[in-house]
């Protein structure tokens, strides 16, 4: 329920709805986009970044909080660990079990490898589970992988590694088919045609969805398949350090039972990092849409072992995080709300940006509206702008909201807001890690036998990712990492396990004069209130 | 000072701000969560919780991340419930009601008490989707259960020992794979790609100078 203080602004929105629904705001020119990004996007706030003084990316700027983790001490700095009697001994070790990890597990199993999946929370407690909007693939006659490529390449500011992007778009239809054959229930017309919509920055309607539970539907299906195959999954167990062999190739990981704090050792011929994103790092104090375990662990593990980062300085702030009520502050309002026709409207009832500009541009426009232009709505917990959801049914007819975005309706309904009748308040939320570990087209990092897949990877999307291309990349690159890691494992001769790189990294920190109390990876954020605790 | 309420976490009393969810109230009280917390936004079902308001008889079930605290709440989390998941080969499974009989015969022992439906944290008609499963109507079961987050509260209340979320999971996979109409344009495109129909186009894009790609991007025709 909106309290009285919102009434005046709400009235303006309602009065202008008819007119705003019909109004087609101008799209920005390339120059206008560049200008608004430079001035208002959080990635451009120089003071919030720090320069790495150690490791492969020495000299590069990364978010200050990430720099802290990359320059922190190992959790096992002063602990002697017996590596010679591993608790697990497998062909392929997969770290993390969101969509990328689960896809990799299925394909590695298919290829005949013995697979161990370790995951920090439960399988599926992951960003994948939360994706609402959908997954892109150019599978309609008026579309093509080449058009998909152009959309993504431009949307990512012409910075994507082309060989990765090319693989992404070419294998997209096959990814959808694979999921569909596993039983994922995509939205279809009665004749089997996929119901597809636009996402920000797409030039064709190629967003496939499973209502607004797209990620959940994909994740729970993959999880079911992993379990059907009897693949070993060890939950509540985090990787806290990679193990290498004497030649510097990845050969396992040190694991931590999150509940008992027991340390375990896994030996493997190849390792896949599929640890996902970093929203819970709360860069620049932003709220986040991410799951509880999104703490950039994979970047830390990989970096210490000698992997390279790419574009670790670019994050995606989703333009529409919930700004009200406070209980869901930062939670994602799916882009599909805008795909279906809801526009962004300021406190005065004016549409101020085309709702389907790319995410970074939309986010920057909202930050400008709430900041410099002072056209934001005071939520009591910051500022926000309106996202005029009732427009959806004006355009698409009654019943559309319940049918197409039931999760959104439920989320606000719990707080007495009927999004069919009233608009909602939004503000950008930390959503996606655009950058990450640099990989080759076959999924390997700079460390031999260390693969990476999913949000932990950087470079597929360049410096900004379009909606629907991440669910796609976790399937395409997750599967491919699983296949390749399994294949590679057949040729790997197990060597002597070592953690020498960890002590070497500590020396490097010392050499760079870095003094810190921090330890990493972070594993989980700490939201407990601190009052005289031990 | 903000308004506060009194809640009881596992029977122990805490005073917390009234605008918190059960999950954030636990953190306010000092719990560092490991179990019972996944997505923090109503999708993963990790945070199943039961509670009773002091003085009332009814037992409520809820997702801790999605539910505001109320005065007098006695709260117990249910971070794990032993659901039974049967394994099967999706490629070989028969698409008829026999499959339910084989894998989840306990659904036929449903006594119709509706405790599952009353307990559902997503407000689903759980008993109804089990009835569809009994009849082998996988499509109806899939639709009715679609919003399930598999938190397991329904099963914790079931006198017949049914693992409802797993039954529904099976129905959805069967529906998605075998019953939903196939997709012609998808199959066509997959075949075109296999035949290399786009290899030339992509190879061309791979070696174009960025300036040309910018040109292409900025002059895109956007489908209405
Ligand atoms: C709210 C939301 C909505 C989204 N909507 C869309 C959308 O509509 N379309 C789209 O394409 N993309 C969307 N995305 C992005 C997309 O969902 C994610 O980028 C993608 O699912 C990431 O998959 P992943 O497998 O790489 O990581 P995740 O799914 O996050 O999985 C990572 C796993 O690794 C585990 N882990 C982390 N650290 C460790 C460790 N140290 N040891 C062991 N395990 C560890 C985690 O617990 C988790 O299980 C959305 C994201 C969010 C948060
Ligand atoms: S934590 Fe995922 S549903 Fe509550």
Image: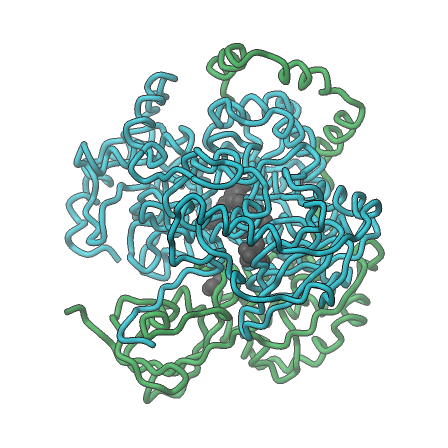
Chain colours: A cyan, B green
Return the x and y of residue B71 as percentages of the image width and height: 28, 79
Return the x and y of residue A468 as percentages of the image width and height: 54, 38
Return the x and y of residue A324 as percentages of the image width and height: 29, 53
Q: How many marks?
A: 0
Residue A15 in sight:
yes
Residue B32 location, quadrant: bottom left
Residue at position x 58%, y 46% from top?
A302
Residue at position x 56%, y 62% from top?
A120
Does residue A482 sit above or below B134 in this rendering?
above
Residue at position x 43%, y 33% from top?
A59
**Nearer-the-camera pick, A77 or A530:** A77
Residue A423 in sight:
no
Q: In the rendered view of the protein, which quadrant contains the C terminus of chain A? A: bottom left
Describe residue A449's horizontal placement relative to residue A204 as left or right: right
Return the x and y of residue A124 as percentages of the image width and height: 59, 58
Describe residue A491's horizontal placement relative to residue A378 as left or right: right
Residue at position x 27%, y 73% from top?
A531
Q: In the rendered view of the protein, which quadrant contains the N terminus of chain A? A: bottom left
**Nearer-the-camera pick, A457 or A366:** A457
Residue B3 location, quadrant: bottom left
Residue A140 location, quadrant: top right
């Amino acid at each position: 329920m909106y309290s009285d203080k919102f009434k005046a602004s709400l009235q303006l929105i309602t009065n202008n709805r008819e007119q705003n629904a019909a109004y087609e705001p101008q799209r920005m020119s390339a120059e206008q986009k560049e200008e608004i990004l430079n001035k208002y996007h959080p990635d451009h706030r120089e003071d919030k970044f720090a320069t790495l003084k150690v490791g492969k990316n020495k000299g590069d700027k990364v978010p200050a909080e990430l720099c802290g983790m990359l320059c922190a001490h190992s959790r096992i700095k002063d602990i002697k660990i017996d590596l010679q009697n591993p608790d697990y001994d497998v062909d392929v070790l997969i770290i993390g079990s969101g969509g990328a990890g689960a896809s990799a597990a299925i394909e590695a199993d298919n290829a005949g490898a013995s697979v161990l999946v370790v995951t920090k929370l439960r399988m599926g407690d992951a960003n994948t589970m939360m994706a609402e909007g959908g997954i892109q693939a150019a599978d309609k006659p008026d579309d093509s992988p080449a058009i998909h490529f152009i959309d993504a390449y431009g949307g990512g500011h012409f910075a994507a590694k082309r060989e990765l992007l090319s693989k992404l778009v070419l294998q997209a239809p096959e990814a959808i088919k694979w999921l569909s054959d596993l039983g994922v229930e995509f939205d279809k017309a009665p004749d089997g045609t996929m119901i597809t919509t636009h996402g920000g920055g797409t030039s064709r309607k190629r967003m496939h969805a499973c209502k607004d539970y797209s990620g959940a539907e994909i994740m729970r299906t993959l999880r079911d398949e992993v379990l059907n195959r009897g693949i070993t999954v060890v939950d509540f167990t985090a990787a806290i350090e990679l193990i290498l062999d004497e030649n510097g190739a990845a050969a396992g990981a040190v694991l931590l039972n999150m509940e008992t704090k027991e340390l375990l050792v896994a030996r493997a011929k190849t390792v896949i990092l599929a640890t996902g994103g970093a929203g819970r790092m709360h860069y620049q104090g932003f709220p986040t849409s991410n799951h509880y375990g999104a703490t950039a662990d994979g970047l830390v593990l990989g970096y210490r072992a000698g992997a390279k980062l790419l574009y670790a300085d670019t994050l995606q702030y989703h333009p529409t995080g919930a700004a009200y009520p406070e209980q869901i502050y930062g939670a994602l309002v799916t882009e599909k709300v805008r795909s279906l026709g809801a526009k962004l409207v300021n406190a005065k009832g004016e549409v101020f940006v085309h709702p389907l500009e790319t995410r970074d541009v939309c986010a920057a426009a909202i930050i400008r509206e709430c900041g410099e232009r002072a056209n934001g709505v005071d939520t009591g917990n910051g500022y926000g702008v309106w996202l005029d959801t009732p427009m959806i049914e004006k355009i698409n007819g009654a019943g559309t909201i319940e049918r197409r975005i039931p999760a959104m309706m439920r989320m606000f309904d719990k707080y007495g807001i009927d999004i069919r009748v009233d608009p909602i308040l939004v503000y950008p939320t930390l959503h996606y890690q655009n950058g990450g570990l640099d990989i080759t087209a076959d999924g390997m990092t700079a460390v031999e036998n260390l693969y990476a897949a999913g949000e932990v990877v950087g470079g597929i999307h360049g410096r900004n990712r379009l909606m629907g291309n991440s669910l796609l990349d976790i399937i395409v690159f997750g599967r491919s990492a699983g296949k390749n890691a399994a294949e590679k494992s057949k040729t790997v001769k197990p060597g002597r396990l070592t953690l020498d790189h960890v002590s070497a990294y500590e020396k490097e920190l010392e050499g760079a004069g870095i003094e810190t109390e921090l330890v990493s990876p972070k594993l989980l954020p700490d939201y407990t209130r601190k009052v005289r605790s031990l | 000072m903000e308004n506060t309420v009194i809640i009881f976490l596992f029977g122990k009393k805490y005073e917390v701000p009234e605008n918190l969810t059960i999950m954030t109230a636990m953190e306010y009280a000092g719990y560092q969560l490991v179990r019972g917390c996944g997505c923090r936004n109503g999708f993963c079902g990790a945070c199943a919780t039961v509670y009773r308001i002091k003085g009332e008889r009814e037992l409520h079930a809820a997702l801790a991340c999605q539910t505001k605290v109320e005065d007098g709440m006695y709260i117990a989390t249910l971070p794990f419930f032993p659901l039974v998941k049967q394994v099967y080969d999706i490629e070989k499974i028969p698409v008829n009601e026999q499959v339910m009989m084989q894998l989840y015969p306990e659904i036929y022992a449903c006594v119709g008490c509706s405790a599952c439906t009353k307990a559902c944290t997503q407000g689903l008609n759980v008993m109804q989707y089990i009835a569809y499963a009994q009849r082998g109507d996988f499509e109806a079961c899939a639709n009715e259960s679609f919003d399930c987050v598999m938190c397991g509260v329904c099963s914790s209340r079931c006198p017949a020992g049914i693992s409802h979320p797993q039954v529904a999971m099976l129905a959805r996979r069967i529906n998605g794979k075998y019953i939903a109409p196939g997709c012609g344009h998808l199959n066509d495109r997959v075949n075109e790609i296999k035949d290399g129909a786009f290899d030339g186009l992509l190879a061309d894009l791979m070696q174009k100078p960025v300036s040309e790609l910018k040109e292409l991007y900025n002059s895109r025709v956007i489908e209405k």
